[in-house]
Amino acid sequence: MDKYKAYFDGAVEPMNPGGTPSVGVVVFKNFKRVHEFSGIPTVPGGQKATVNFAEYEAFLMVLIYFMANDLLKEDITVYGDSKLVIEQMFGTWSINEGIYVQKAHEAQELMKKFTNLKGQWIPREQNAIADRFSKQVLIDAGIPITDYSQYKKKSAY
């Protein structure tokens, strides 16, 4: 059986809450990069984006990728530096309140379709590849980010 590793990250810049949200996703199959995605999600009308909203959007992009490619029975481990997402989806934390709640419930429903999906929290420095994608899309859109020094060159990823 193939092994998949997916990394996700979300950001909100130049301020959180209220800035522009972005997502970054990178998927590996047996150590080979097979998918990457970055984007700026739409915030529900009248609400301010939060990093938790962006992190859940990124996590949903991971699930959607695997669903769209009919990989629901594969061995998948999802890595993220969002303790909230990992603990709420794979651990024991409850879903409370905030703009992210609807996305969290969407993710829970999608996860029911998978047979071998695991999640693991990792420190931010181990999630650099997804972090770069989430930040680069903001830079490309002309959105200032708080610490852009490591993202100035697209060749960084």
Image (tube, grey):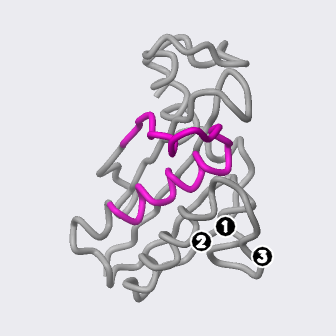
Q: Quadrant of residue 31?
A: bottom left
| Residue designated by label 2 | 119
> Tag 3: residue type?
Trp
Front tag of 1 and 3: 3
Q: What label does residue 93 carry, if any?
A: 3
Q: Earlier in the sequence, mark 1 or mark 3?
A: 1
Tell me which segment is drawn in magenta: 37-64
> Tag 1: residue type?
Ile
Residue 113 vertical position relative to residue 129 in the rendered view, above or below: below
Q: Earlier in the sequence, mark 2 or mark 1?
A: 1
Mark-to-mark CA distance, 3 and 2:
14 Å
Q: Crowdedness of circle 3 by 10 Å Cα count: few (<14), some, many (20+)? A: few
| Residue designated by label 1 | 86
Front position in the image: 90 or 32: 90
* Residue shown at the point (44%, 73%) measured from the top left: 76
* Residue shown at the point (42%, 59%) measured from the top left: 62
Front position in the image: 88 or 99: 99
Q: Find numbered disc 1 in the image and state the secondary structure of the residue it sits on.
A: helix
Q: Crowdedness of circle 1 by 10 Å Cα count: few (<14), some, many (20+)? A: many
| Horizontal side of residue 149 vs 58, given as left or right | right
Front tag of 2 and 1: 1
> Tag 2: residue type?
Gly
* Residue shown at the point (46%, 59%) measured from the top left: 6
* Residue shown at the point (51%, 45%) measured from the top left: 44
Q: Quadrant of residue 12?
A: top right
Q: Crowdedness of circle 2 by 10 Å Cα count: few (<14), some, many (20+)? A: some
Q: Are marks 2 and 1 in contact (CB under 8 Å)?
A: yes
Front position in the image: 109 or 18: 18
